[in-house]
Amino acid sequence: MRTAVKRIIFATVGIILFLLLSLLLLYIYLAPENQATSVADESTIRQLETGEVIGFIDDGVSTWLGIPYAEAPVGELRWRAPRPAGKWVHRRESLAFGSPCPQNSQGTVRGVEDCLFINIWSPHSVTRSQASNNKYPVMFWIHGGGNSIGEAATSIYNGARLSREHKVVIVSINYRLGPLGWFRHPALRSESDNQKDNSGNYGSLDIIKALSWVKDNIAQFQGDPDNVTLFGESAGGFNVLSMMASPLAKGLFHKAISQSGGLNLTPITRAENFKDDTEAGDRLSSREIVNALLISLGKASSQTQAKQLQQEMTNAALAALMRDLSAEQLLGLYTGSFGGMLGNPDLFADGYVLPADRSTLQIFSDINDYNAVPVILGSNRDEVKLFMAFSSDHVRKTLGIPSGFTNLSAYNRDNRYATDGWKATAVDQLAAAMTNAQGNGVFAYRFDVDDWRNFGLIKLKVLFGAAHALELPFVFGNFPNPLRVIFPSSMEAEFNTVSTAMRSYWAEFAYNGAPGNGQSSTFTTWLPWDNSPDPVPRLMVFDTLSDNGIRMTSDRLSMENLRARLLADKSYTSQDEHCSIYKRMFRGDAFNADEYANLGKSGCSESHQE
């Protein structure tokens, strides 16, 4: 009887924990703004080229939501570069966020293709004439979500607090996601000779279009079009760096912050080819997706038949077939997603929107190859634990719920390799290359806060640590109540100290291109990255006072450091795991066949799977 009761209690606690963890994941990227009915305020009337808009006052900040920055990319404009927004005759009430772009969410598809909207928070001015005399720095936010989920309306991203406290104009946007945002197929190129239309980088072009809109219109909202700072997290951080790499974005922004970003440009062959071609395509390449479509429609019964049929069909017939799909049908062709994130190929090295035939380090090593601006690059100390918590074999699951560890040391070891690899490529090595290319103006950070609530069943400090995306509430100063379930009240003062500092540094950077001591001039001096081989301060660490606080360190990582560490690692009891981590960390030119063949206790072969 006691055993049965224990099982019931354990299962109940497990379900509660699962719900709390699900809320955490949901609130990171998808939780909608809990917005009360907004009342239009005449002080927010603005005249744009496309028509008049009126907003409202949000927490003492002038706010406009859901302004179209481009024409709806529907019908024939699906898989086309964004076109200018159409004009409207009557005053447009900009009181609510526009629809999110189509994406998977808990087994269904939410959002519509008419989704290209921009949102603005600006320090409140009582009159329009007063507003016209003000020019504040603009901070342009790009949301994350693997370039396949997420939206600007997420409650964490509300820009009112940043705008009010630091006198900045906050802008956020929706941009096309997944295969509606990034998709290349030869049949679509036959329809147009426009290089933008043919690039496949439609989500990237949406961001460029929104930046162009800001350049033309933001002065109406007290923003300085000559002082625009991009900032974004995860895929948003990747997109920030893609704007630095894109010649089409030149002059549209002046500073950049990449939070947990990086840049991996997808070769065209991987984006388009069949997976059994000599130059293999991705398993979710456009050719493979069309194969899946043909099979799902009953036009072919196997991959071989689908491939043959696809090669026989005319471009016009293939294009019509793809354009006739609903968003639900299209997204349903993609399998193997995590939390709705599809893993579809994106950020194509097309040679027009984004560079071709150059590695990321090559691009950012020459100021002639990228838009060199002051930049902050950062990562979280335990990035991948957000994903490992639900996928690692070293986490014990009860009814699919994390409930303990089968091997905690292996869990932490795997996190260190994967997270350190992320930091080495997305922060340290990029910071070194940019510093060599452009001199000063390159700054780096690591987010270490991990003082989460202990639920008893499993310690979140151990399960998550300073995981991916957990810095977001600190940057915006927004801690929605459902998210607070992981934040112990005993740490509230310390969390507020870290959040206040991060907001102050971000704003000071937006004003002056260097975070310095923050806008209040009271925080630790944030020094630029230093390539010296000596142990000099080069990395800002954000942590609570209980864990050594906010400080500069000399920490630096490189992939060669990690290679040496992995080759010497004797902790692996599973040769498959040792081989797998090597294949995940060292791809392309970084892969050494001899090292791989002699790795660990018995070496690796092609039979070892990732």
Image: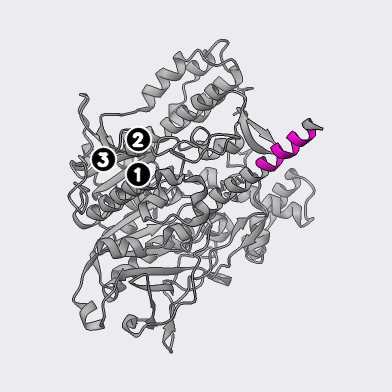
Q: Earlier in the sequence, mark 2 or mark 1?
A: 1
Residue 55 badge? none
Furthest toward the right, the residue is 1
Mark in the foreground, 3 or 1:
1
Chain part drawn in magenta: 4-13
Residue at 33% from the left image edge and 67% from the top image edge: 212
Location of residue 218 in the rendering, given as x and y in whole percent from the top left corner? 29, 71
Residue at image mark 1: 494
Furthest toward the bottom, the residue is 90
Q: CA distance from mark 3 to mark 1?
A: 33 Å
Residue 7 magenta: yes
Residue 434 badge? 3
Q: CA distance from mark 2 to mark 1?
A: 8 Å
Please rate how many residues cluster around mark 3, counting C-alpha atoms within 10 Å: few if below 14, some from 14 to 19, many from 20: many
Q: Is residue 456 left or right of residue 172?
A: right
Amino acid type, residue under disc 2 in the picture: Ser
Q: Is residue 469 left or right of residue 286?
A: left
